[in-house]
Image (cartoon, grey):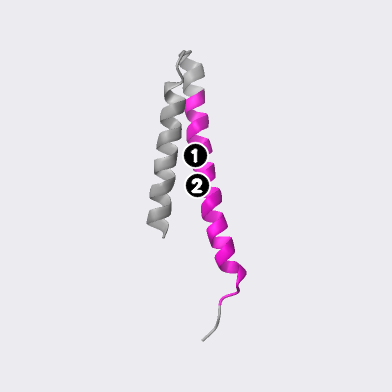
């Protein structure tokens, strides 16, 4: 039986972490753009983007694992 290189697992899990961070940042940035476009005083879309980003990233990780 052929063994996997020891760094392949590290690369796999670091890629998942980077994808999670990228998704959260993208959702937050999208919410920030909407708040600026609509000139809202309370950052409603930014907060919603952060929440959706975190839950979406968690869903992605659970589905991946």
The answer to whether the residue labelled 2 contacts the one labelled 1, judged by CB atoms less than 8 Å apart, is yes
Task: Read off the magenta span.
Answer: 4-32
**Residue 48 placed where, x, y %?**
41, 29
Please provide percent x and percent y for residue 36: 51, 18
Q: Secondary structure at mark 2?
A: helix
Please name the residue shown 43% across and 53% down the image. 61
Mark drawn on residue 34: none
Residue 60 shown in magenta: no
Inter-mark Cα distance, 2 to 1:
6 Å
| Res 24 label | 1
Quarter holding the C terminus is bottom left
Magenta segment includes 21: yes
Point out residue 10 in the picture as x, y percentages from the top left corner.
58, 63
Position of 36 with respect to 45 (left or right) is right
In the rendered image, the vertical position of residue 48 relative to residue 14, given as above or below: above
Q: Secondary structure at mark 1?
A: helix
The residue that mark 2 highlights is: 20
In depth, the one of 42 and 4 nearer the eye is 42
Q: Residue at 39%, 42% (x, y): give it.
A: 55
For residue 6, above or below residue 21? below
């Amino acid at each position: 039986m052929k063994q996997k290189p020891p760094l392949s697992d590290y690369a796999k899990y670091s890629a998942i972490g980077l994808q999670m961070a990228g998704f959260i940042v993208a959702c937050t940035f999208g919410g920030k753009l909407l708040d600026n476009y609509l000139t809202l005083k309370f950052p409603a879309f930014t907060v919603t983007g952060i929440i959706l980003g975190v839950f979406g990233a968690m869903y992605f990780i659970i589905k991946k694992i």
